[in-house]
Amino acid sequence: VSSLAIDNIGLLVTNDPALGEGDLGIMRDVALVLDGERVVSVGASERGATPADERIDAGGRCVIPGFVDSHTHLVFAGDRADEFAARMAGAPYAAGGISATVTATREATTASLRELAASRRAEALRAGITHLEVKSGYALDSAGERRLCELGGELTDDVTFLGAHLVPPEYADRPDDYVALVCGEMLSECAPHARWIDVFCERGAFDAEQSRAVLRAGREAGLGLRVHANQLGLGPGVQLAVEMGAASADHCTYLSAADVAALAGSATVATLLPATDFSTRQPYPDARRLLGAGATVALATNCNPGSSYTTSMSFCIALAVREMGMTAEEALSAATLGGAMALQRSDVGVLTPGSRADLVILAAPSYTHLVYRPGVPLIHTTVLGGRVEWTQPDLK
Ligand code: NIG
């Protein structure tokens, strides 16, 4: 099939203000025509007569760009449900929990890691995520990190090398030697398989000087920069991300006035991960403060076994609206266009002629239902590159 018309769309979010109302570029009673992997046209619905090889009747439902999940750690083995249960009983979250997943991941076969990651990718697709970033970071040795980057590359072209996730136990008494390994041999192994480099700049992980060294080395190797910043407390991460021109500063749970001003005055996207703050019993970041200052905000799932084991962007949107001061429009934009901006991509996160044909038909007349009906599976159909990849079996 070369062309597909999605007809009888009640409400279409294009994320292009030139095409429709408001920042979301909303159009009503329209049809989208997809050809191959691209959108070719957006126009008035011809009620079943829109010319195309195949046709889907959206039945007046809402259609949105597929979610762009700009922060995930999908490739890992093991389970940390006990750690989660202990947290719910009052234990604090600590960066050191990462090492339990490192042990399990190092022991896992490549085939089992591939299968686990593919099943999480399929789950994300059912949750309406059409594009995602995948980090390494659960091997923390050169061959293992390379293996994780290669496996990530089977799922996306936005692979992030995160050798600087935690100092592994065997380097516990010589962390600077580990930083040298990350910046040297490990980077050489991983850079050919990655687009980005990331560092966990936080107490208990890497300090500002170590993080700067990692980012500099990554940049010299041709990688774009990302930073895990200000997750567990105030610290240097956000300022470092801005100073180094990183594409995004992720987490931003704790922000000083100077951090907010730095983000607002830069092209660095503040990527907020509310499912993490939910799962670690932390305060939620103040998205309103960031938006009010003029910062660009993205929402992402941070799917990982320790701090946020979810692929539900709908859940993140609901938390962002209920707990972080975002409107439904802002949250939807942050989960689609915001994610694309955090990954410096213009082909996803929008539905305009020429963009990738990645979209979601919601089982709802409006995106507000993502917040209004929390926890309800509202992803009716996911279209990826012009092909229907998922449709809820019981829904007509
Ligand atoms: O983004 N902050 C560092 N990395 C992950 C947590 C990983 C883990 O606990 O396994 C995060 O929250």
Image: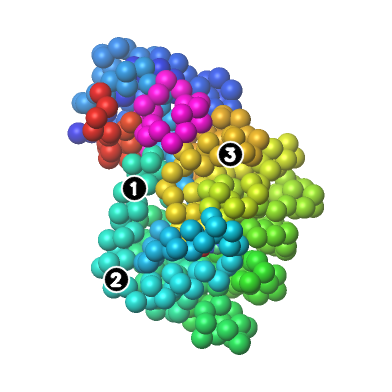
Say whether disc 3 or disc 2 marks the residue closer to the N-terminus: 2
Query: Which residue position holds label 3?
Result: 320
- Name the residue located 45 percent from the left edge and 54 percent from the top edge: 309
Q: Is mark 3 within 8 Å of ligand 1?
A: no
- Name the residue located 51 percent from the left edge and 31 percent from the top edge: 371
- Name the residue located 34 percent from the left edge and 47 percent from the top edge: 123
Q: CA distance from mark 2 to mark 1?
A: 20 Å
Quarter of the picture containing the C terminus is: top left
Q: CA distance from mark 1 to mark 3?
A: 21 Å
Secondary structure of the residue carrying numbered label 3:
helix
Outermost residue toward the right in this view? 257
Segment colored magenta: 356-379
The one of 388 and 173 positioned closer to us in this rendering: 173
Classify 242 as above or below 209. above
The answer to which image quadrant residue 134 occupies is bottom left
Which mark identifies residue 16?
Answer: none
Query: Which residue position holds label 1?
Result: 123
Q: CA distance from mark 3 to mark 2?
A: 36 Å
Tell me if 227 is positioned left or right of 361 in this view.
right
User: From where the camera sits, is residue 38 visible?
Assistant: no
The answer to which image quadrant residue 322 occupies is top right
Query: Which residue position holds label 2?
Result: 110
Quarter of the picture containing the N terminus is: top left
